[in-house]
Image (cartoon, rainbow, N blue to C red):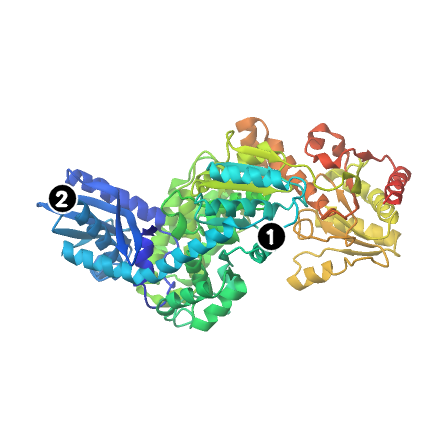
Amino acid sequence: MVRLPIRQCVELIMRSGDIDNRYAPKDRMLEGARAHRALQKINRERYADYRSEVFLAQTYHYNGIDYALEGRADGVFSHDGQYVIEEIKTTVLPLESVEEGNAVHWAQAKCYACILAVQNELQEVSIQMTYYHLETYDTKQFVRMFTADDLDCFVSELIEKYAAWASFSEQWKELRDRSIKALYFPFPFYRKGQRELAVHVYKTIVGGEKLFVQAPTGTGKTISVLFPAIKAMAEEKTSKIFYLTAKTITRQVAEEAFGKMRHGGLKMKTLTLTAKEKICFCEKPNCHPEYCRYAKGHYDRVNEAILDAVQTGDDLSRSAIEAFARKYTVCPFEFSLDLSLLADCVICDYNYVFDPKAFLRRFFAEGTSDYVFLIDEAHNLVDRSREMFSVELRKTAFYQIKKAYKGRDKTLDKILNSINRYLIDLRHQCGQQGYYVTADKQKEFIALVNKYTAVCERMLKENRDLSEDSDFLQVYFDGLHFGTIADFYDERYVTYAEAQQNEVVVKLFCLDPSYLLGEALQRGRSAVMFSATLSPLQYFRGILGGDEKDKLLALNSPFDEQNLCVITAEHISTKYKERENSREQIAHLINTFVGCKKGNYIIYFPSYKYMHDVFADFTAAYPAINAAEQAPAMTEEERESFLTQFVENPVHTYVAFCVLGGLFSEGIDMVGNRLIGTAIVSVGLPQFNVQQNIIRDYFDHKNGMGFEYAYMYPGMNKVLQAAGRVIRCESDIGAVLLIDERYSRRSYRNLFPKHWFPLRNVKDIRNMEKVLTSFWELK
């Protein structure tokens, strides 16, 4: 049985022509949904038997395969003794210019009408195509009647065209599932904790639940979550796996895990999604046919490209997608999105499931599904989700449009003047302190922004040349996104305004992303969130959209705990006011730390300034030691060059000064003796500022743990990540030095992983030299 969503089928088979995103709105979904509900309410009052969002499904048989054609009709009712299917479409085009010839719109409605005719033994069904204007709220309707025979013939032809896809999918599914059932774990034995993790993941997926896992570095988390998820797929517990990451390097780890399993016989199609800006073949991603030859005629060629790609190989990585896109002259990004429909596992950024701007509506627009979400490095999702669910607008951006387009459109001039007056008034409210915070939803400003985007959309429809103005488009898209986020605004948000000179920034700031993350997680059947640093687990479960019924799992380190020496220097304060006095003392401490064993070391600091100041003291006092410091805004080449200094078996000691929470404190994997020690200066607290304080105040009111949620937990997560750079495999040996008097406090020590104990607290340089000499002599 092939499940065949009507919209997906129709759009796949009947599309043609160019990609042209010059003036198409990026996200009118919420606005369109409201319009649907408004029209459906009116029609329920007009027609006694009017039903909205009617689920219709019918099984069709073709060439030995059953197709379950299904979808939701916007409306079903009877009029003058005739059954009517209503299809509602929204537009901002003048209604007089709307024609009835959109083949995709009619095709979708004809599928619903055919099912209705079969189920009710009707001879004919009418279709009412209703276009709703989003600005004027006027409607325009087209009504056509179809016989049951005509509808049946149309659907039969549609399924016949889809058969090539379905036949491949069914044959592939059978081959894939056979290979999964025969698949063995791709390593000769499980590491400590791996089998336990795999079992918990499998049970979580089968039970349709959520699991939050802290598994230390070296556990082998990627294969331990993928293997049971793949096994569950063969048992029809899920039809697709999404492996979600925050960084390119972790995507590569997932690709390598699939490579190992393919060597063991696995047949599985995996696709890695790459952001449009990175995979686009053009200098800039302008998706319209006059600019991009890959956009021109894309839909005429893309279906052939898809079939070729999925029939040729199973590893649909970036390089493979680019090769097929060039071969068929299609847009690589849109091509990859279409390929994702046929992939068994999609490896992608968090955005594609969670971000209101970017989530994959082709999978998630219908609501819940049987998909499984495997969320790697889940600690990153806290800040990322706050960013996804927040939005800001700037006065200067509107002012630039006001200057550039003055006199071009009276309505635009009027709305920009209103926005400017509102923001000037807001600047006055910021006063001497420079900012203003309110929990109240700023309905007046939101309404102004929505009017602005409506005017821009009309102008773009009337004049395509405007789509060449990147500044005009950017403010338009920012305004659309602002309207989308405004629809989420509730008690978990504040409006934060900041004024500096001529600039005013208005931000809808999501303080607590848990509710929206929880809503997003409901798009799938099950979710597993895992990281080496998910401590405390209860905090991450709550903030990442879980609740008390969701399971927690904390694993011990799989490595010999004697190979790691954790030292605390609790006699030094690194609080902001005392940093100037601590510089020289820390420089001497670092010298002793790195002087006990020749090798490569990283010293982490909470800020660039603190790092630079101690680096200057250190190099002045110990010029013979090879040392370097991280530079701000390093290019990809500079990062690679920086990391190449960490060589195996170095002739001389090398000390790198880096920023905690920066490029080199997470995601780098220097196994062996490329890195034998890290020192972490401070407890990593985020910089005290207005926004972090707003978060603190919110959680103080909610659960009395404002400081922990806003400062302590995020800070210590950075410390745990940095310390985790040292021990990466069974043979690694290394030391970690924690410098701050707060490490003596129970509240901080409770966040330390078990394998850090017993701690060695050193009270002076001589004491530390003795501890480290003893440790290294035993190794």
How far across and down, in percent of the image, does residue 553 sit?
Answer: 60, 35
Residue 762 visible, this angle: yes
Q: Secondary structure at mark 2?
A: strand
Q: Is residue 578 left or right of residue 227?
A: right
Residue 723 shown left or right of residue 448 in the figure = right
From the top left corner, tell me how far across and down residue 14 is, in percent.
Answer: 29, 62
Pick the front one: 308 or 532: 308
Q: Quadrant of residue 464?
A: bottom left
Horizontal side of 210 relative to 618 (left or right) equals: left
Q: Confirm whether residue 691 shows in the render.
A: no
Point out which mark residue 250 bears: 1
In this rendering, is residue 302 above or below 481? below
**Residue 589 as seen in the image, left or right of residue 256:** right
Q: Report the disc number at residue 70.
A: none
Quarter of the figure with the C terminus: top right
The type of residue carrying mark 1 is Thr
Q: How many marks?
A: 2
Residue 615 location in percent, x, y?
A: 80, 51
Disc 2 marks which amino acid?
Answer: Ser
Q: Residues within 10 Å of mark 2 (few under 14, many from 20)?
A: some
Q: Secondary structure at mark 1?
A: helix
- First of labels 2, 1 by sequence position: 2
Q: Nearer the viewer, residue 606 or 394?
A: 606
Number of other residues with Cα within 10 Å of mark 1, as a class: few under 14, some 14 to 19, many 20 or more: some
Residue that badge 2 annotates: 78
**Quadrant assignment, res 520:** top left
